[in-house]
Image (cartoon, grey):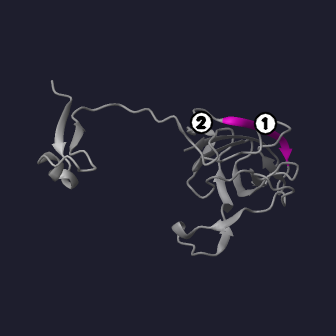
């Protein structure tokens, strides 16, 4: 089986005709087979190796906030009940947010900046627990800075995992938490977990 063939380079037919002063070889080797390539990363502009990010295979950063009254808020994930935290979405585009409350009803979900004792890349302090703002032009909101995620009343079922998919709007956020408000009408213990997707 022939794996390589030779072809004439279009810029160098004179070389093939016997003109030895041509500066470019007239032959090009053309591979005639399929070769698998494994892409494990790249070298950045500083010369440092950076591995490729892959999606989380399972939920992580589990948290549990007990006895949250109606109208009460939690921040998830938190360092009290879940590790690692806050969420680092660097290299990730989308996210699954899972919540399991003991009282069903409406809950408010907002994407906010993480705590001020962490830095956003090399910036510190940040304004903690404020709504993340950005341009969602792809989502039809124009070029103005809008809340990246603010769902004021999402029906949530009690005692089961409710899983919400958040596509693209929180991509690459380095210091991410969720402010979840219990608007279910009664006290609730709230469990949370997260999964990031490339």
Q: Is residue 132 above or below residue 1?
A: below
**Which is more toward the observer, 176 or 17?**
17
Point out residue 80 in the picture as x, y percentages from the top left corner. 86, 38
Range of magenta residues: 60-68
Which residue is denoted by mark 2 in the rendering? 56
Is residue 33 a member of the stretch shown in magenta?
no
Residues 101 and 91: in front is 91
Q: Does residue 10 lie above or below 79 as drawn? A: below
Q: Residue furthest front?
A: 21
Q: Which residue is depicted at the point 53% across and 67% down?
A: 139
The residue identified by callout 1 is 82
- Where residue 168 appears, x then y in whole percent? 56, 55
> What is the crowding at mark 2: few (fewer than 14 residues within 10 Å), some, or many (at least 20)?
some
Please identify the quadrant where the N terminus is shown: top left
Q: Residue furthest top?
A: 1
Rendered residue at 22%/55% (across/down): 11
Magenta stretch holds residue 62: yes
The image quarter containing residue 37 is top left
Q: Quadrant of the C terminus?
A: top right
Q: Residue at x 20, y 49 (%)?
A: 9
The Cα atoms of the two marked residues, 2 and 1, are separated by 16 Å
SS at badge 2 = loop
- Tell me if 28 is positioned left or right of 170 in this view: left
Nearer to us of marks 2 and 1 is 2
Relative horizontal placement of residue 136, taking residue 102 as reference (left or right): left
State the predominant SS element of the stretch in magenta: strand
Q: Position of residue 156 (x, y in %)?
A: 66, 50
In this rendering, the count of numbered labels is 2
Callout 1 environment at 10 Å: few (<14), some (14 to 19), or many (20+)? some
Residue contact between numbered discs 2 and 1, judged by CB atoms under 8 Å: no
Q: Secondary structure at mark 1?
A: loop
Looking at the image, is mark 2 or mark 1 earlier in the sequence? 2
């Amino acid at each position: 089986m022939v794996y390589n063939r030779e072809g004439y380079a279009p810029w160098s037919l004179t070389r093939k005709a016997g003109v030895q002063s041509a500066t470019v070889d007239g032959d090009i080797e053309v591979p005639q087979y399929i070769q698998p390539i494994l892409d494990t990363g790249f070298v950045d502009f500083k010369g440092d190796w950076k591995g490729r990010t892959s999606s989380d295979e399972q939920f992580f950063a589990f948290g549990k906030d007990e006895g949250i009254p109606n109208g009460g808020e939690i921040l998830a994930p938190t360092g009290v009940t879940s590790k690692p935290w806050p969420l680092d979405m660097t290299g990730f585009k989308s996210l699954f947010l899972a919540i399991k409350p003991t009282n069903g009803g409406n809950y408010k979900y907002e994407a906010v900046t993480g705590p001020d004792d962490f830095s956003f890349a090399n910036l510190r302090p940040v304004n903690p627990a404020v709504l993340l703002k950005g341009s969602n032009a792809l989502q039809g909101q124009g070029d103005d800075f809008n809340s990246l995620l603010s769902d004021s009343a999402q029906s949530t079922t009690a005692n089961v995992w409710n899983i919400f998919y958040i596509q693209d709007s929180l991509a690459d956020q380095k210091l991410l938490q969720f402010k979840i408000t219990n608007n279910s009408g009664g006290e609730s213990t709230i469990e949370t977990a997260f999964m990031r997707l490339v």
